Image (spheres, grey):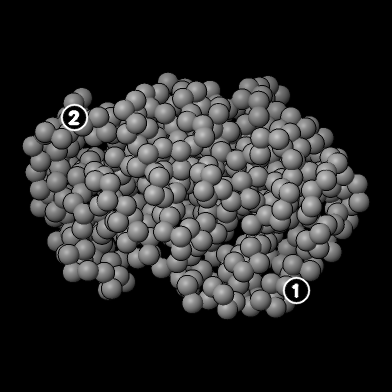
Amino acid sequence: MTTSRATTAKSGPELQGISAAALHWNLTAAVLIEHAVRRGEGFLADNGALTAKTGQFTGRSPKDKFIVREPSSQDKVWWGPVNQPIDPARFDALYARMRAYMQSSEVYVLDCFAGASPKHRFPVRIVTELAWHNLFCRQLFIRPEDNRPHADPPQLTIIDLPSFHADPEVDGTRSETFVIVHLAKRLVLIGGTSYAGEMKKSVFSVLNFLLPLARVMPMHCSANVGSGEDVALFFGLSGTGKTTLSADPARGLIGDDEHGWDDDGIFNFEGGCYAKCINLRQEYEPHIWNAIRFGAMLENVVVDPETRRLDYDDGSLTENTRAAYPVTFIENAVVPGVGGHAANVVFLTCDVFGVLPPIARLEPAQTQYHFLSGYTSKVAGTERGLGADPQATFSTCFGAPFLVLHPTSYATLLAEKIAKHGSACWLVNTGWTGGSYGVGRRIDLPVTRAIIRAALSGQLAGVPMQKDPVFGFQVPASCPGVSGALLTPRKSWKDPAAFDARAKELAALFAKNFAQFSDVSADVRAAGPAA
């Protein structure tokens, strides 16, 4: 075995039963870029970012995710379509074949951390066969200051081999693609897919298991902080605006996607950002635009082969084009990514029905109801199998694919944090108005920014509120810089009767989805819309 970096670490991949023909450990971003270009994995765009294609799969493969059913965790895991069980013996056999496969491979190893809070810093080791995958993780997670390998065994190891495929009949997988988490061994195996986001979300899934057991709330949200140290959280699925709305020039960015909430406040799990690039505009998202430079990693963004100019409007490869870059590439980033307790909690929903208002104030029971509901739309490309049009969906806790415990565990913990710290809670629709998808139009980003700023600054505190007749939450009668017709969606529809019918249809979908949460309190069940 050869290495491109000498190390005196007490433990290494070879001591975990892993060896390789060539081992590259904790390479810098510049060297990883050189390796990726030399190996034909990607090339530099005209702005200096490394571009790569993920091939067949341009999104996550949730149906190919498994958790090993073993004694130490089996009574805690929320088993079902999200967390499919797999036998320990199958895992061990697959792991043995992956180790044998790596013996003749060139392998890249990164030792990094998840968790900006010193109390909850989580050592992670990531082993990849692609240089650009290693760069992706290096830019997204928290890098050790001295760039040295972990002195002690990591608390989680991820092995990602896109060219290694499972045999479903032998391995018990659904297909040749697999993402398998062994919670007892703190080991994740990934194969058959080049989509780098599987590694990022595997770390998040493990933290979603471990942290609530320590009374720390893991959250699929972005976070920023104002000049008055007021922290805001933005929950939402991909495409609803988590990254875009948290990157506000007037506020410091704590992080764009995954955070924890402990007794001291909010802390970022990561050290980088993972921003959607489709239709990116410098005038609307200057912080993200300027962060895409040398050191940034682009996935599936179309590039002119001669000029190397990027075309952010071209979704021919996927609508789920992405940029990964260190949070320090954002001018107003908060480093380390920690802040106080949340003053405002925002649930972002992309309503394809076009009936939800652009903002509504939620009472405590409504907060739990809408958190458990997680109503939004799946945007094209974020998962395999999605079409070009957005699809209405309910993703509990605004992150069902990453939950390992039962959803009520997270909802109860979040409710306790909000009640203890007096957080104001808002539901913000970044989807359609004036009609459903295909008829109405999507709410303009500058309008949503104005609404968010008004809420976070306290400008809506003294504004008269009106109760929505169907959904029951409180809607501001006015908002600086926003038309009254937009705030009351029914007024923006040409046919009020058609609006009423669609609102009733959506309310029925809420009720049908929430029937699964029969164990919640009566006041939470009653906080939903009137079907």
Residue 203 in the image: above or below residue 173? above
**Can you tell which quarter of the image residue 14 is in?**
bottom right
Task: Locate residue 44 relative to residue 400 in the image: left or right.
Answer: right
Q: Earlier in the sequence, mark 2 or mark 1?
A: 1
Task: Locate residue 19 relative to residue 130 in the image: left or right.
Answer: right
Q: Residues within 10 Å of mark 2 (few under 14, many from 20)?
A: few
Which residue is disc 1 drawn over? 93
**Can you tell which quarter of the image residue 88 is in?**
bottom right
- Can you give x and y, in whole percent of width and height, for residue 333 in the image? 48, 29
Which numbered dot is residue 459? 2
Task: Locate residue 257 relative to residue 191 in the image: left or right.
Answer: left
- Can you give x and y, in whole percent of width and height, for residue 191 in the image? 69, 59
* Residue at 71% from the left image edge and 48% from the top image edge: 150
**Element type at marker 1?**
helix
Which numbered dot is residue 289? none
* Residue at 47% from the left image edge and 46% from the top image edge: 258
- Can you give x and y, in whole percent of width and height, for residue 82 in the image? 48, 66
Task: Locate residue 333 relative to residue 520 in the image: left or right.
Answer: right
* Residue at 49% from the left image edge and 37% from the top image edge: 337
**Element type at marker 2?**
loop
For marks 2 and 1, give the CA distance: 59 Å
